[in-house]
Amino acid sequence: MDSLFLTPGRKEKNKEARDKDGEVTFDPSIAQEGNMSSYFRIFVKPNTICHNPALRPIQPANIIRHRTSIYTEGDRNIDEIGNISAGSGIWYGPDDKRNTHLRLRTDINSNQLGELAAVLWAITEEPLQNELIIITKSVYTLKGILEDYKKWECTGYIGTPNKEIFRNIIAALRGRGGVT
């Protein structure tokens, strides 16, 4: 145990936070309903060896941890000839040199992809040991990351819109050593 899993007390705090639009902590545990073998979909050659197992980095006790809050926003644009692009804004604070924006060419006409890209960027750019608070107005993003992913994992994300980026976000969150 690395103290990132949600204890009954932390789960109760999450429930209260959801009711009051407060900070909700991501639960990195894997959903377990039914037979454990239904969660594994592995397509590799039988003799393949994994050299990078899926483990969170070990956190030394004396490491300095910072608390970072990041605001994210998604957008989309269609130019005069019909090309679609998703955009993202990532904001740390006034005049912060880390404030940035992203633009993705896509065929998906949705603000949601831009928001998800901003969240993934924020998760992967912040040092793993730091506590990370992501502030977003996107109910779609929050619900997907905090609730729906458990159902999606049970079905292998079949039929899930934006499944590739949601998978990457969940994997990045699980790989963090700081509370997110």
Image (tube, helix red, strand yellow):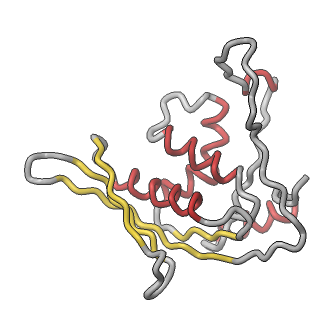
Please name whichever residue, 31 or 17, is drawn nearer the observer in this view of the structure. Answer: 31
Give left or right: position of 85 versus 149. left
Residue found farthest to the bottom: 94
Q: Residue at x 67, y 22 (%)?
A: 41
Q: Position of residue 68 (x, y in %)?
A: 63, 76
Q: Residue at x 81, y 26 (%)?
A: 36
Q: Quadrant of residue 62?
A: bottom right
Q: How many marks?
A: 0
Residue found farthest to the top: 46
Whether residue 1 is visible: yes
Q: Residue at x 37, y 61 (%)?
A: 102
Q: Residue at x 57, y 41 (%)?
A: 167
Q: Position of residue 80 (x, y in %)?
A: 8, 53
Q: Position of residue 174 (x, y in %)?
A: 71, 50
Q: Position of residue 136 (x, y in %)?
A: 50, 67
Up-down relation of residue 94 to residue 9 (above or below) = below
Whether residue 5 is visible: no
Up-down relation of residue 127 to residue 29 (above or below) = below
